[in-house]
Amino acid sequence: MTHKKLIIALAGNANVGKSVIFNYLTGLHQHIGNWPGKTVERAEGTLSFKGYTIDIIDLPGIYSLSTYSLEELVSRKYIAVERPDLVINVVDASVLERNLFFTLQLMELETPMIVALNQADIAKRKGIEIDTEKLEQLLGVPVLQTVATKGRGVSQLLEIAIKVIEKGQTTRREVRYGEEVEGRIARITETLQDAQFIYPRRYVAIKLLEGDEEIAREIAKLAPKAVNTAKELAGEIENLHGHACSTVITSERYEAAGRIARQAQKLVPPLKLTAEERLHNLTTDRITGYLIMGSSLLLIFFAIFTFGNYTSDLLSNLLNRLEPLSTNLFGTGIVGSLVWGGAAEGLIAGVTVALPYIIPFYIVLYFLEDSGYLSRIAFLMDNIMHKIGLHGKAFIPMMLGYGCNVPACLGCRIMETKRERTLAAFVTTLVPCAARTVIILGLVGHFLGIQWALALYVFDLVVIFALGRLAFRIMPGEPSALIMEMADYRMPQVKTVLKETWFRLAEFIKIAFPLIIVGSLVIKAADVFGLLNPVANLLSPVTVTWLGLPVITGITLIFGVLRKELSLILLAALLAPVGLQALTPVQMVVFTLVAMFYIPCVATISALVRELGGKKALYITLFEIAFAIILGGVALRLLTLFA
Amino acid sequence: MSSKSVEDYLKAIYILSQNGKSVSTTEISEHFNIAPASVTEMLKKLAKKGYVRYSPYHGAQLTSDGFQVAERVTRKHRLLERFLHDVLRIREDKVHSEACEMEHALSDEAEESLCRYLNHPDRCPDDGKIIPACDLPFSTCEECIELHKKDLEESGRRELIPVSITQLKNGERGKVSFIRGGHKALQRLSDMGLTPGTEVTVVKSAPFHGPLEILVRGSRLALGRGMSERIFVEAEKA
């Protein structure tokens, strides 16, 4: 049997169950990376079916193929330029009209395609019944009902897909626009007759009429005349309708989608509110909404930190028992201390933060996302986030930041524009992560009382707000508004949640672990060769004179770059036998303040580099160092004044 | 009864009434600082002209005609405030009284030019209220800039001035007719289904001037406040 390779892309709106189908098809044979040169995620997986090796590409969830967002641009380029063998368009049966708007755009790209009509069970509960055959006939492409969460219809989907690829697709209907538009499309396609491009001619003509800058730029090189003709003709349409040509075309496309939806579906709205709707009303209400949000977030944090603390201790005790083994193997000389104190401790550090805190955080986050609750939180928080130039969606990475800043920075991808990604990433690095919580609770909370620890948390929120606002004022550009679909609530799928968690964890390990280990090695080496004390002395004008801290804090703060809570653990060790009590209360507060803000940890810096580029990561790092030093010094002087 | 005082009264009722509720005689008399008796007399006259619905105990409520006049003069007022503040650099606390005098003299044509000149502002400078939309039949401001050079008479005018969806009550519907802004904003909204002519239902708005929850084409969307204020609809009572 010959193994032929095929490429199939999954495309559709957000929240239609696309990734469930993707997971179902590819299992664990997935690879999540970025599109080349873009911070847009690319999920890819492989499977074997009927003698074919099939690559499945899960395109980002989008609503249109215009060029508003990076995701849209990437998806369009992929379908049009790289030409997958087939596109499976996943459609949410419960919001048919809006989904078909996207389907019609895909059809204009003239790639072979089939439609997976998903979530028909949810649609049914909302009183929507869809005639699949009718829909198939209206679109001219195969339509299959699927219930992806139960795996129903997914393998038939592949069968039909293969059939279409083997036999070719001939029946596709095209969207017909009004006469005045169609006539002009025809005239543009005429002028395009001789030129050769990757896009279908009719598609180019439509896009040129819509004034699509990206396409116009590409076509201008090949057929400049067509671009000018299109401009003229678009002007004529504008005069006829009194509306911009792109609006006319989008409207007509939506009308077509609506017409098809109305013909293919029967609507019998249920008399009573469905349970999902009641839950939606409760969770977005002006009173109960905030109550539910507040208490569930508190509960989540409390549960994760209790669990994390416990398992973290357990794990580090367990792993530290391996020390004698390392000593036996490598001795206690330079090599031995580098292996254990450097590499192994770095690894332990990574494991004891990642596993106990990050895994539960991810599980909860994807559970909330999959159920649809995150979009309600974004709805409730939009107003507050706007004050720092972000919209409600940015609250999600911020929340994640309380667990660990690394996934939080990666999570800023959900923001639409570059400017917002930068702003959101900057703000999330100020959020006290699990490691910083260890310092706050372990030092200030333990010795000065929990009220002081809470005061520091509140202060942190104030700083986030103030610096966020400042950054928002300084950074050029307009904030973009929230336009977000709030899809119906649904039962989260354990499999999807676990899989997402697994892939995110793998990503985290790839980014963070090498750096933590190499960093540990470097610092341990510096220690072994006696370089740390000179460095601490070098830093003493800052640490001792300006911040009023012991000289050795210079060393511990350097370690803290690897992992924030190390700075406290080390400090306790270096201050032995007295321990942390050797610090005055003012010193405790100052040290904690500095540790909270002074630099993103090395793993976070690498996440920043990855998401924003080296320059912005450097600026953020430098700013936070300066800010923490200034803040610590001012705090010292104010506190001594009042103490 | 001069047209100035008609406009002033209608504007006052427009501002004082929230969500289309009735405004009491006392509220109006306090607003103008005049005797309730003269207010009652004026309201009766306005009722006769068909601008307000008036009953002695419930107070006054704008009719559709009255609402149009009030929106128009409020628009002129707030545009003038922007002009006085942004261009003439008059202090924020002084622009209101100045604009109150000028609003009655500004012609519709001058008002439209002023709007274009000021680059289609959203809000007035002193209390940040939304500037009502105009009655030109364009779906965005960019269209207005591009097309106004051609004959405006030819494009005609709207029968009703569209209102921002933030002015709708929970459960009220309207048809999208105008987006304050450019093609980009419109394109983004259109892609989500908010094309001109589409029916939109406002479900609710999040507290503290948060985003709006709307229903459009069978799907539920959350729309940021600033964006919602720029979406104008032909209101249709639920």
Image (cartoon, coloured by chain):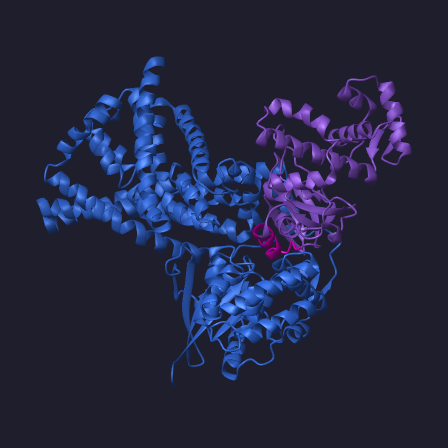
Question: Foreground: A133 or B87?
Answer: B87
Outermost residue on the right side: it is B48
Quadrant placement of the N terminus of chain A = bottom left
> In this rendering, would A513 be left or right of A178?
left
User: Residue A295: in sight, yes or no?
Assistant: no
Q: Residue furthest bottom?
A: A1
Find residue A405 and report its horizontal and vertical position in percent.
37, 43
Indicate the position of residue A429 as horizontal and vertical percent values: 38, 40
Coordinates of residue A56 in the picture (x, y in percent):
44, 69
* Position above or below: A141 against A318: below
Quadrant where the C terminus of chain A lies? top left
**Along the horizontal axis of the image, is A273 left or right of A24?**
right
Tell me, yes or no, if residue B224 can be seen here: yes
Query: Could you tell me which residue is drawn at 73 percent across and 56 percent down?
Result: A270
Residue segment shown in magenta = B184-195
Q: Is residue B221 above or below residue A240?
A: above
- The percent coordinates of residue B94 (x first, y second) are 63, 22
User: What is the letter of the blue chain?
Assistant: A
Q: Colour of chain B?
A: purple
Q: In this image, A310 relative to A365: left or right?
A: left
The kind of secondary structure the magenta stretch mainly shows is helix
| Number of on-image labels | 0
Residue drawn at (35%, 44%) of the image: A616
Residue A489 falls inside the magenta stretch:
no
